[in-house]
Image (spheres, rainbow, N blue to C red):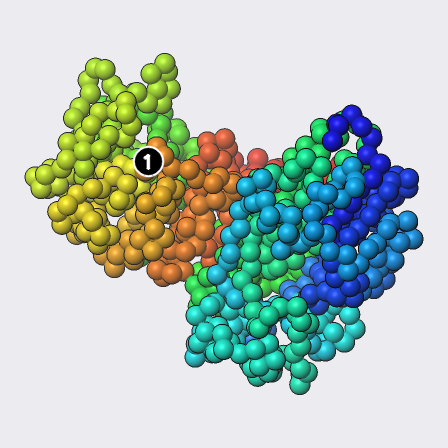
């Protein structure tokens, strides 16, 4: 296909919503185009029941084709509410702005509109070779089971991830007045329904469960009719005596499915272009399949009719749409995993469970819920604050400003200044810089401050500029800072560590940043003689004598931390430093009792923790920072991380500080906002321990959403606090919370900030 030649004819394989809407959009832009749609099925042969539209999707359709949008809108059943039924309670949240339409009704509307514009629709027309179609461009809109894609997986770079849960797409004549999630406990596990009305007197009813529950209930031995009858019994409380039905006549045997997440690294092969489910899928639990297909169609129609270079236009189409698809697939992945691991949330209070469900994809945030349904969110905030021990009030604080009690320590709020190495100490002694650095953040309203990684011996440092707690002068220097922080109403914890194989390097700035020291270096020790990188010193494998010395160094530092007045002490077992190197199989290759199984790899870190716990006050909390994932193959498993967290909790740990990575140069994390929070979520709700989330958390919405959903109990922010020491005060002003007490010297400024922000919110966007 010559890139400079005008497109005169387009063939579309597939008359689903995406293919039909592409044909409509093409003819609207260029009525002279020859557009032919080939569909192997009859016009009235479709799988599924209803289609969900958000207000945003409808707005996109109105902008592209107001006439079609108006016809679709006239056929909608609208609802604003979402009902969550769990453990005999119903939690309702409003303001969600969705609409449903029958899939067959939608297809009929699109078919009629396409014909009216001159599209040639050919049903029961099986295309044997899509590339042989006589058209300038051929669009494969042939759906989830795309023959075009599946016959050339290497060409399109096909990646299909088949998810673990089983689901079946059913229908019923019961009319639900809200989008309904109904969770039922059975002797074989939990099973649940996603149900919504798509036309008067008809609803979609999707049943989902784990494979273990599916088999336990005998669904693996039932045909579709038997499945409907069994599901009617399970969900009788919500069906009002109505039957369940399936229209999956084209499927052999049972109509139960596993959802396949489809991703293609290339959407084009010569004149063939993929569209919609042929190129990508997103889980049904966020209702995005039709949305993505429509938006693909709009953008592809623009590319094929803009009159410019066709190759460039199609490349731009794919580049632009790929970004949007990845966003939706990321949200869908979050939603999918929530349902796949729903067992971990079933112990939550029903109100918190519903909040967790509503925010599962991270597309709906805390403040977004306030816009949708203020009363619902106020109820969540009231429940959260009272559960934390705050007095009852009609004006509850946001979750970030609820207190948290850990043993004898009560934190005034849940915002934490994360440990951040400053590399500015003199032979381990902190000075004026550290006083101002940490003092400023205490003045800024954070509930808890962590010191930077503080090393328990001179040879435990990363660089010569690292802070220490291995001489009495260090204790006294830290006490000066602790006293100042306490004077501002904040609490402070010390993070104690040993750098292990990552030590004896230059500060991370200057011409030799992070390179091994050429002068004044020291010998490194590690569980195994594996250097951090090819450029770094190879550490000596630790002997039992080395372990005794390191343990005793941690004990001494813990005693001095108590004498300095710290409120909490944290043992650093993350980021590839010494104790982290024991925990991960990436760097622990020992063959003795300290290597091999996770229980063995835990042995020495637990020994160190127990020795510290023995000298730390009984009413003083202790925490452990973990790298819950190595982000590498053959690294820590999620099960390992849960087991490690549980073991520390049983040894007396009060808080697991959940980080990840930095244990290997080969790690490949998938970055994004709150990208490490799922690790905290898993550890908190599977191990049953208090956790702190960290990792690209930077907005008040992030913090409140994480806390209210039960994904963590504290949120640590690093770079946001570097940029704004007053982050917590600003957050209080933004959210209207007046319970925080700025220093008296700053109160006038805080009041003015609060007034200015309130005026901006009232004025709205400019």
| Left or right placement of residue 245 versus residue 453 in this view | right
Check disc 1 and report the residue beneath it.
664
SS at mark 1? loop
- Residue 629: percent from the left, percent from the top? 37, 45
Quarter of the image with the N terminus is top right
The quarter of the displayed image where residue 198 is located: bottom right
Residue furthest bottom as drawn: 241
- Residue 240: percent from the left, percent from the top? 67, 83
Q: How many marks?
A: 1
The quarter of the displayed image where residue 206 is located: bottom right
Whether residue 583 is visible, yes or no, is yes
Whether residue 301 is visible, yes or no, is no
| Left or right placement of residue 337 versus residue 99 in this view | left
- Residue 178: percent from the left, percent from the top? 69, 69
The quarter of the displayed image where residue 108 is located: bottom right
Q: Residue at x 47, y 40 (%)?
A: 670
Q: Is residue 534 above or below residue 605?
A: above
| Left or right placement of residue 526 versus residue 197 in this view | left
| Left or right placement of residue 615 versus residue 685 in this view | left
Camera-nearest residue between 564 and 185:
185
Camera-nearest residue between 631 and 302:
302
Q: Residue at x 59, y 49 (%)?
A: 150
Camera-nearest residue between 454 and 695:
695
Q: Residue at x 60, y 53 (%)?
A: 282
Quarter of the image with the C terminus is top right
- Residue 522: percent from the left, percent from the top? 17, 24
Q: Badge 1, how many Cα within 10 Å: few under 14, some, many 20+?
A: some
Residue furthest left as drawn: 545
Camera-nearest residue between 283 and 625:
283
Q: Residue at x 31, y 41 (%)?
A: 574
Q: Is residue 375 above or below residue 10?
A: below
């Amino acid at each position: 296909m010559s890139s400079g030649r005008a497109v005169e004819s387009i063939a579309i394989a597939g008359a689903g919503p995406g293919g039909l809407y592409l044909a409509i959009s093409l003819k609207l832009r260029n009525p002279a185009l020859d557009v032919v749609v080939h569909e192997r099925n009859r016009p009235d042969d479709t799988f599924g029941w209803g289609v969900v539209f958000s207000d945003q999707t409808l707005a996109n359709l109105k902008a592209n084709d107001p006439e079609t949008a108006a016809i679709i809108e006239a056929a909608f059943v609208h609802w604003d509410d979402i009902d969550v039924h769990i453990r005999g309670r119903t939690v309702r949240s409003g303001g969600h702005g969705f609409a449903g339409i029958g899939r067959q009704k939608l297809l009929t509307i699109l078919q009629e509109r396409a014909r009216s514009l001159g599209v040639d629709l050919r049903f029961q027309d099986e295309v044997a070779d899509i590339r042989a179609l006589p058209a300038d461009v051929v669009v494969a809109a042939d759906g989830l089971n795309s023959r075009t894609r599946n016959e050339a997986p290497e060409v399109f770079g096909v990646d299909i991830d088949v998810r673990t849960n089983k689901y079946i797409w059913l229908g019923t004549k019961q009319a639900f007045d809200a989008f309904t999630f109904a969770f039922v406990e059975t002797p074989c596990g939990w099973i649940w329904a996603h149900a919504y009305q798509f036309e008067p007197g008809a609803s979609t009813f999707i049943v989902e469960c784990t494979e273990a529950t599916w088999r336990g209930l005998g669904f693996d031995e039932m045909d579709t009719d038997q499945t409907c009858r069994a599901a009617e019994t399970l969900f009788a409380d919500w069906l009002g005596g109505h039957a369940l039905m399936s229209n999956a006549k084209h499927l052999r045997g049972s109509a139960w499915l596993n959802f396949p997440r489809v991703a293609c690294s290339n959407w084009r092969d010569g004149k063939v272009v993929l569209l919609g489910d042929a190129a990508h899928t997103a889980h049904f639990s966020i209702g995005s399949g039709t949305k993505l297909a429509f938006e693909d169609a709009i953008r592809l129609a623009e590319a094929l009719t803009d009159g410019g270079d066709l190759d460039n236009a199609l490349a731009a189409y794919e580049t632009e749409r790929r970004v949007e698809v990845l966003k939706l697939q990321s949200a869908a992945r979050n939603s999918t995993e929530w349902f796949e691991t729903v067992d971990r949330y079933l112990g939550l209070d029903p109100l918190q469970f519903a909040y967790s469900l509503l925010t599962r994809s991270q597309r709906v945030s805390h403040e977004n819920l306030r816009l949708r349904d203020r009363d619902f969110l106020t109820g969540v905030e009231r429940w959260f604050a009272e559960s934390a021990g705050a007095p009852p009030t009609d004006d509850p604080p946001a979750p970030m400003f609820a207190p948290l009690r850990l043993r004898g320590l009560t934190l005034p709020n849940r915002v934490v200044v994360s440990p951040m190495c400053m590399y500015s100490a003199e032979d381990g002694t902190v000075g004026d810089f550290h006083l101002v650095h940490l003092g400023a953040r205490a003045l800024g309203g954070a509930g808890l401050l962590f010191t930077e990684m503080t090393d328990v011996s001179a040879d435990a440092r990363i660089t010569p500029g690292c802070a220490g707690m291995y001489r009495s002068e260090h204790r006294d220097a830290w006490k000066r800072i602790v006293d100042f922080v306490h004077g501002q109403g904040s609490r402070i914890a010390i993070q104690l560590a040993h750098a292990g194989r990552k030590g004896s390097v230059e500060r991370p700035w200057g011409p030799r940043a992070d390179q091994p020291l050429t002068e004044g270096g020291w010998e490194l020790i590690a569980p195994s003689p594996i250097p951090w990188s090819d450029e770094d010193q190879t550490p000596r494998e630790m002997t039992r004598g080395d372990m005794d010395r390191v343990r005793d160094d941690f004990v001494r530092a813990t005693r001095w931390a108590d004498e300095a007045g710290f409120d909490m002490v944290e043992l650093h077992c993350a980021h590839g430093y010494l104790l982290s190197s024991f925990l991960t199989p990436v760097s622990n290759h020992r063959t003795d009792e300290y290597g091999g199984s996770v229980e063995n790899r835990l042995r020495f870190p637990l020994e160190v923790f127990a020795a510290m716990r023995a000298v730390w006050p009984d009413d003083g909390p202790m925490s452990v920072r973990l790298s819950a994932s190595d982000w590498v193959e053959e690294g820590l498993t999620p099960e390992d991380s849960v087991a490690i967290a549980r073991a520390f909790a049983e040894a007396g740990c009060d808080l697991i500080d959940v980080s990840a990575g930095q244990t290997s140069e080969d790690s490949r994390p998938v970055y994004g906002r709150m990208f490490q929070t799922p690790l905290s979520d898993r550890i908190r709700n599977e191990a049953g321990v208090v956790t702190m989330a960290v990792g690209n958390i930077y907005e008040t919405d992030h913090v409140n959403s994480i806390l209210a959903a039960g994904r963590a109990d504290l949120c640590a922010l690093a770079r946001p606090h570097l940029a704004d020491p007053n982050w917590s005060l600003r957050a209080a002003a933004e959210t209207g919370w007046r319970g925080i007490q700025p220093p008296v010297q700053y109160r006038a400024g805080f009041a003015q900030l609060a007034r200015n922000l309130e005026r901006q919110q009232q004025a709205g966007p400019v």
